[in-house]
Amino acid sequence: MIAIEDTLVSEDLLDSYFVCNLSKCKGACCIEGDQGAPLLEEELGMIEKNLDRIFAYLPSEQQEKITEQGFSKVYPDGELGTQLMDDGACVFVVRENGILSCGMEKAFKDGKTDFHKPISCHLYPVRVKKYKEFSSVNYDRWSICSPACALGRELGVPLYLFVEEALTRRFGKEWMKALKATAEHLAEENANKG
């Protein structure tokens, strides 16, 4: 583990390769699993503020679910997350040509909102867990992402660089600068050993 400020970062972020390959996985992370996407308390207001503009990107079935049950819920383990549809998909999922994507992200990219998407989704497959004294930053390995691992290796993109924008959004530029410096230092050490 690498200590940066009040975080402990798994070296897996530096040693693993990753580039999402939607043509292979079809956005499975938006439908697989037992819970919706983890949400931070501070994200609730941002989503609520932009909800009307996000609705324009969502099918009527999702709009109805959100109107009736809300867009978030607290799961049995106490985690706050997005609401799920009956098929297990996140309520913000958009389906196009057999590929799942995020209605929040589409609205953001079209300049309709000022909220990208939940940081947990932006960071994925990196997960952050907050403890009393620190936060852990880990790689959540999952078989549905095998095509992304293969593409990342092929393109030579380390996981931490694939999620650089999200890590910077979550922890700030100085934190990201420190992570990059650590990665470069470790790469030099490994090169000198070989």
Image (tube, grey):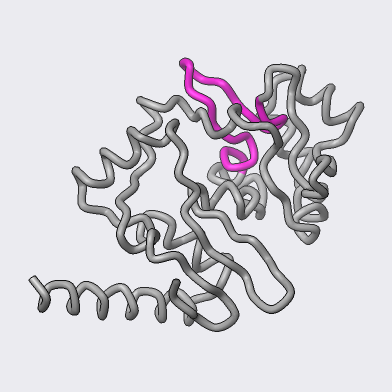
Say if 169 sits above or below 84 in the image.
below
In the image: residue 157, left or right of residue 162: left
Say if 23 sits above or below 177 in the image.
above
Image coords of residue 33 (percent x, y): 62, 32
**Residue 65 vs residue 24, the one in the foreground:** 24
Q: Which corner quadrant holds the C terminus?
A: bottom left
Number of marks: 0
Image coords of residue 28 (percent x, y): 51, 28
Q: Residue at x 35, y 74 (%)?
A: 180
Indicate whether residue 91 is drawn in magenta: yes
**Residue 81 vs residue 99, the one in the foreground:** 81
**Residue 14 vs residue 97, the one in the foreground:** 14
Magenta-drawn segment: 89-107
Q: Residue at x 19, y 43 (%)?
A: 154
Q: Which corner quadrant holds the N terminus?
A: bottom left
Image coords of residue 150 (percent x, y): 26, 38
Residue 2's quadrant in the figure? bottom left
Residue 143's quadrant in the figure? top left
Indicate whether residue 143 is drawn in magenta: no
Q: Residue at x 45, y 25 (%)?
A: 26
Image coords of residue 181 (percent x, y): 33, 80
Q: Residue at x 34, y 47 (%)?
A: 18
Say if 150 sits above or below 129 in the image.
above
Return the residue found at the far left: 194
**Residue 4 vs residue 23, the one in the foreground:** 4
